[in-house]
Image: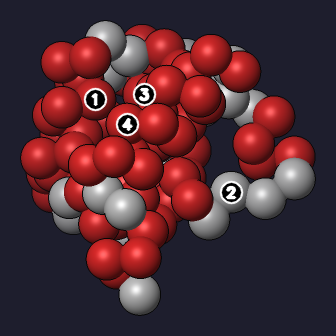
Amino acid sequence: MNSPEVKAFIRKHSSLFWYIPEEKKEDISNELLVETIFNYGTLDDVRELINILGLKQINSVFFGLKGREKLNYYPEIYNYFYLMLSNYAPRDSFN
Protein backbone atom coordinates (compact mmCIF):
# COMPACT_ATOMS: atom_id res chain seq x y z
CA MET A 1 0.00 0.00 0.00
CA ASN A 2 1.42 3.37 -1.02
CA SER A 3 1.74 6.31 1.36
CA PRO A 4 -0.46 9.39 0.89
CA GLU A 5 2.57 11.29 -0.48
CA VAL A 6 3.22 8.63 -3.11
CA LYS A 7 -0.46 8.54 -4.07
CA ALA A 8 -0.49 12.33 -4.48
CA PHE A 9 2.67 12.11 -6.62
CA ILE A 10 1.05 9.46 -8.83
CA ARG A 11 -2.10 11.58 -9.21
CA LYS A 12 0.04 14.60 -10.12
CA HIS A 13 1.78 12.56 -12.86
CA SER A 14 -1.27 10.56 -13.85
CA SER A 15 -0.74 11.16 -17.56
CA LEU A 16 2.49 9.13 -17.46
CA PHE A 17 0.44 6.12 -16.34
CA TRP A 18 -2.19 6.44 -19.09
CA TYR A 19 -2.30 2.67 -19.67
CA ILE A 20 -3.28 1.84 -16.09
CA PRO A 21 -6.98 2.04 -15.12
CA GLU A 22 -7.73 5.07 -12.91
CA GLU A 23 -8.84 2.97 -9.94
CA LYS A 24 -5.53 1.04 -9.92
CA LYS A 25 -3.06 3.88 -10.44
CA GLU A 26 -2.53 4.70 -6.78
CA ASP A 27 -1.60 1.09 -6.02
CA ILE A 28 1.26 0.68 -8.50
CA SER A 29 4.53 -0.76 -7.22
CA ASN A 30 7.59 1.31 -6.41
CA GLU A 31 9.38 -0.55 -9.21
CA LEU A 32 6.89 0.64 -11.82
CA LEU A 33 6.82 4.13 -10.34
CA VAL A 34 10.61 4.52 -10.46
CA GLU A 35 10.84 3.02 -13.95
CA THR A 36 8.17 5.32 -15.37
CA ILE A 37 9.50 8.49 -13.76
CA PHE A 38 13.10 7.72 -14.73
CA ASN A 39 12.12 6.93 -18.34
CA TYR A 40 9.49 9.61 -18.97
CA GLY A 41 9.59 12.19 -16.19
CA THR A 42 11.63 15.35 -15.94
CA LEU A 43 14.61 15.81 -13.64
CA ASP A 44 12.33 17.82 -11.35
CA ASP A 45 10.01 14.79 -11.22
CA VAL A 46 12.99 12.59 -10.31
CA ARG A 47 14.05 14.98 -7.54
CA GLU A 48 10.51 15.02 -6.17
CA LEU A 49 10.35 11.21 -6.25
CA ILE A 50 13.68 10.97 -4.41
CA ASN A 51 12.37 13.37 -1.76
CA ILE A 52 9.24 11.25 -1.32
CA LEU A 53 10.68 7.71 -1.42
CA GLY A 54 14.16 8.50 -0.19
CA LEU A 55 17.46 7.74 -1.85
CA LYS A 56 17.80 4.44 0.00
CA GLN A 57 14.47 3.12 -1.40
CA ILE A 58 15.24 4.38 -4.94
CA ASN A 59 18.65 2.75 -4.73
CA SER A 60 17.13 -0.53 -3.56
CA VAL A 61 14.58 -0.56 -6.38
CA PHE A 62 17.06 0.43 -9.09
CA PHE A 63 19.92 -1.89 -8.12
CA GLY A 64 17.47 -4.74 -7.47
CA LEU A 65 16.72 -4.96 -11.20
CA LYS A 66 17.33 -8.30 -12.88
CA GLY A 67 17.15 -9.55 -16.45
CA ARG A 68 14.06 -8.30 -18.24
CA GLU A 69 13.46 -5.49 -15.73
CA LYS A 70 16.67 -3.76 -16.86
CA LEU A 71 15.46 -3.85 -20.45
CA ASN A 72 12.43 -1.75 -19.50
CA TYR A 73 14.74 1.25 -19.11
CA TYR A 74 16.08 3.09 -22.13
CA PRO A 75 19.83 2.30 -22.30
CA GLU A 76 20.90 5.93 -21.90
CA ILE A 77 18.48 6.41 -18.99
CA TYR A 78 19.74 3.25 -17.26
CA ASN A 79 23.35 4.36 -17.74
CA TYR A 80 22.69 7.88 -16.42
CA PHE A 81 20.90 6.72 -13.28
CA TYR A 82 23.37 3.88 -12.72
CA LEU A 83 26.19 6.42 -12.67
CA MET A 84 24.23 8.95 -10.62
CA LEU A 85 23.07 6.48 -7.99
CA SER A 86 26.49 4.81 -7.82
CA ASN A 87 28.02 8.20 -7.10
CA TYR A 88 25.44 9.63 -4.67
CA ALA A 89 24.08 6.47 -3.08
CA PRO A 90 26.70 3.72 -3.21
CA ARG A 91 25.18 0.28 -2.73
CA ASP A 92 27.76 -0.66 -0.07
CA SER A 93 26.48 2.05 2.27
CA PHE A 94 23.07 0.33 2.50
CA ASN A 95 24.18 -3.21 3.28
- Of mark 3 and mark 1, the one earlier in the sequence is 3
Q: What's under tag 4, amino acid-wise? A: Met
**Tag in front: 2 or 3:** 2
User: Compared with residue 42, is residue 21 higher up or lower down, i.e. above or below?
Assistant: below
Mark 2 and mark 3: Cα distance apart in space: 15 Å
Q: What secondary structure is marked by label 2? A: loop
Marks 2 and 4 close (CB-CB < 8 Å): no
Residue at (43% x, 68% y) in the render: 91
Q: Is disc 1 in contact with disc 4, using a CB cutoff of under 8 Å?
A: no
Question: Pointer 3: what residue?
Answer: 37
Q: What residue type is labelled 2?
A: Leu
Q: In this view, does 2 lie above or below 19?
A: below
Measure how far apart labels 3 and 1 are at the Cα level: 6 Å
Q: Nearer the viewer, mark 2 or mark 4?
A: 4
**Label 3: few (<14), some (14–19) or many (≥20) C-alpha neighbours in 10 Å:** some
Task: Find disc 4 in the rendering and name its residue.
Answer: 84
Question: For residue 12, which quarter of the picture?
Answer: top left
- Contact between marks 3 and 1 (CB within 8 A): the answer is yes
Gap in angstroms between the C-alphas marked 2 and 4: 16 Å
| Residue under the point 24% across and 23% down | 45
